[in-house]
């Protein structure tokens, strides 16, 4: 059974110390660690802020289910998901996913799979604000197609 760590919060975070601690916790159990950090883009000045909302309790359970599904599918030793909510500025990390597996392919694919589901199916509501006002962000056709790869 994989160790699953899911953290959702408003506080900004630095990915590097989290990845280091995750790696150290897996020293004897795995041969590969993959990670992904998603960062807010400014879209050339069109996006000044990102606002992420969630439903506490429900969102954590769903993200844990996504991580657990990937852990089972890819035989992972551990998964870490750290996701921001609240107000986020350009350049700030939004999400960190780290996976630990015996082999690199499983670690890479699990990390990719988790991100595809977080981007398109996790219960987060995203609103972008910029000089032209605010707009809600929905998953794109590409996001949905990326997720579909793992459903087949």
Image (cartoon, rainbow, N blue to C red):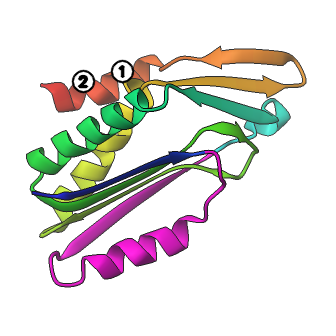
Which residue is pictured at 78% across the width and 17% down the height?
Answer: 134
Is 136 placed left or right of 151 in the picture? right
User: What is the x, y in percent for residue 90?
Assistant: 75, 46
Is 97 placed left or right of 134 in the picture? left
User: What is the x, y in percent for residue 9?
Assistant: 57, 46
The residue at which mark 2 appears reads as: 148
Between 35 and 29, the one lying in front of the other is 29
User: What is the x, y in percent for residue 80?
Assistant: 35, 57
Between 79 and 150, the one lying in front of the other is 79
Between 116 and 5, the one lying in front of the other is 5
Based on the displayed image, in which of its 4 quarters is residue 4 positioned?
bottom left
User: What is the x, y in percent for residue 21?
Assistant: 41, 76
The residue at which mark 1 appears reads as: 144
**Is-magenta flag for residue 124?**
no
Instruction: Write the start and end of the magenta stretch as one range.
Output: 10-39
Label pair 2/1, CB-CB below 8 angstroms: yes
Q: Which element carries disc 2, helix, strand or loop? A: helix
User: Mark 2 to mark 1: distance in Å?
Assistant: 6 Å
Badge 2 density bin: few <14, some 14–19, many ≥20, Cα 10 Å: some
């Amino acid at each position: 059974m994989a160790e699953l760590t899911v953290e959702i919060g408003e506080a900004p975070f630095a990915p590097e110390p989290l990845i280091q601690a995750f790696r150290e916790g897996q020293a004897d159990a795995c041969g590969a660690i993959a990670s992904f950090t998603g960062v807010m883009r400014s879209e050339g000045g069109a996006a000044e802020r990102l606002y992420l909302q969630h439903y506490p309790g429900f969102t954590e359970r769903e993200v844990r289910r996504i991580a657990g599904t990937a852990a089972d599918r890819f035989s992972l030793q551990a998964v870490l998901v750290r996701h921001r909510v609240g107000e986020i500025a350009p350049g700030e990390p939004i999400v960190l996913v780290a996976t630990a597996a015996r082999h690199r392919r499983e670690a890479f694919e699990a990390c990719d799979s988790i991100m595809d589901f977080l981007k398109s199916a996790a219960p987060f509501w995203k609103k972008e604000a910029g000089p032209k006002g605010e707009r809600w962000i929905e998953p794109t056709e590409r996001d949905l197609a990326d997720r579909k790869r793992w459903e087949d």
